């Protein structure tokens, strides 16, 4: 047997654990979707410190609102005791807002309107995004360009045209007047169109071989694959509809149709600016949104991770 054959069949020499770790550290690490903060420990500490400072700066107004909501009106306006109240903590601000306003009705109206706007917006935006992504029709590029251009139009500019349109349709002071104008969301159409573009077309071709049409493909093939993105879009639309103040304030004058932002503003205007009551109202208005985000935050993260927005 030659020396070449001996070298081929000779087993490699065993490595010690220290040598194995040294060889692994010398190999190039894959640079995928991981956030690179530097190889040194100091760089990571500095990066985490900056993130903690930014998080505290973002949480400070929320903390101030929570502290003010549990104070009396006298302590809320006392700059010397802005952290710990001189007269102790109290729930008087919450009880006063609950007694002076019709919070259960306002929350119910806000929930009904926000839920209706969310369902209609997601359905209309998904169908429009599918049409722009998977179908060919005359003027497709022009209509999509107009949709993208509509993203740049502030909603405040459309208040007067919306009001005149609802007035001509005799829909003022109705739920329809509050809901219908909010269902047009060009930015959601753009997001869903880009999402449908990222889905593999082989699934659509297989469904067409089985005899499926556009509606069947849209409803049974693409929508089940788009659940994380649809959930994220629904959450953002729901939050926007819940916090919307200007259009519900303009389109309705019936107290029975007031949403939570409009109702809280009417209480503040009627009884003057009370800081503790104002912060208590803000906390009560934000509490449902916090619960929605806590329940569906995984869907938001998953939608970002599966649509290329996370660097994939």
Image (cartoon, rainbow, N blue to C red):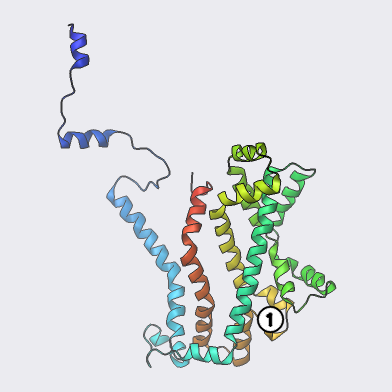
In the rendered image, which residue does mark 1 sit on?
Answer: 257
Among all residues in the image, which is located at the extreme front? 210
How far from the left and from the top, in percent, is residue 82?
41, 84
Identified at 73% across, 72% down, the residue is: 176
Identified at 62% across, 49% down, the residue is: 220
How far from the left and from the top, in percent, is residue 53?
38, 64
Tell me if 6 is positioned left or right of 45 in this view. Answer: left
**Whether residue 75 can be seen here:** yes
Total labels drawn: 1
Identified at 78% across, 77% down, the residue is: 172
Image vertical order of residue 67 relative to residue 158, above or below: below
Identified at 75% across, 45% down, the residue is: 140
In terms of secondary structure, where does tag 1 sit? helix
Image vertical order of residue 124 relative to residue 165, above or below: above
Tell me if 39 is positioned left or right of 277 in this view. Answer: left
How far from the left and from the top, in percent, is residue 241?
62, 69
How far from the left and from the top, in percent, is residue 73?
47, 91
Q: Which part of the image, by quadrant, shows the N terminus?
A: top left
Among all residues in the image, which is located at the extreme right? 168
Image vertical order of residue 2 relative to residue 41, above or below: above
**Whether residue 186 can be seen here:** no
Q: Residues within 10 Å of mark 1 (few under 14, many from 20)?
A: many
Tell me if 42 is positioned left or right of 279 in this view. Answer: left
């Amino acid at each position: 047997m030659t020396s070449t054959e001996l070298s081929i069949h000779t087993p490699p020499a065993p490595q010690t654990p220290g040598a194995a770790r040294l060889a692994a550290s010398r190999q190039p690490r894959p640079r995928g979707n991981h956030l690179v903060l530097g190889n040194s420990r100091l760089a990571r500490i500095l990066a985490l410190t900056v993130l903690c400072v930014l998080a505290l700066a973002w949480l400070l107004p929320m903390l101030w609102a929570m502290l003010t909501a549990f104070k009396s009106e006298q302590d809320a306006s006392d700059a010397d005791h802005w952290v710990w109240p001189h007269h102790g903590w109290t729930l008087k601000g919450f009880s006063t807002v609950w007694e002076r306003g019709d919070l259960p009705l306002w929350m119910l109206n806000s929930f009904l309107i926000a839920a209706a706007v969310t369902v209609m917006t997601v359905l209309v935006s998904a169908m429009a995004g599918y049409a722009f992504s998977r179908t060919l029709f005359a003027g497709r590029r022009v209509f999509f360009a107009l949709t993208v251009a509509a993203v740049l139009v502030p909603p405040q500019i459309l208040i007067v045209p919306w009001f005149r349109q609802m007035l001509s349709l005799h829909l003022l002071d109705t739920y329809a007047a509050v809901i219908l104008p909010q269902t047009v969301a060009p930015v959601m159409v753009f997001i869903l169109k880009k999402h449908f573009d990222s889905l593999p077309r082989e699934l659509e071709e297989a469904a067409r071989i089985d005899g499926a049409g556009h509606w069947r493909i849209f409803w049974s093939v693409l929508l089940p694959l788009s659940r994380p993105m649809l959930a994220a879009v629904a959450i953002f639309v729901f939050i926007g509809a819940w916090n919307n103040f200007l259009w519900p304030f303009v389109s309705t004058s019936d107290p029975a149709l007031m949403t939570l932002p409009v109702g809280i503003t009417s209480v503040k205007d009627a009884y003057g600016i009370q800081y503790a009551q104002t912060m208590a109202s803000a906390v009560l208005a934000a509490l449902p949104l916090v619960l929605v985000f806590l329940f569906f935050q995984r869907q938001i993260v998953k939608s970002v991770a599966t649509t290329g927005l996370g660097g994939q």
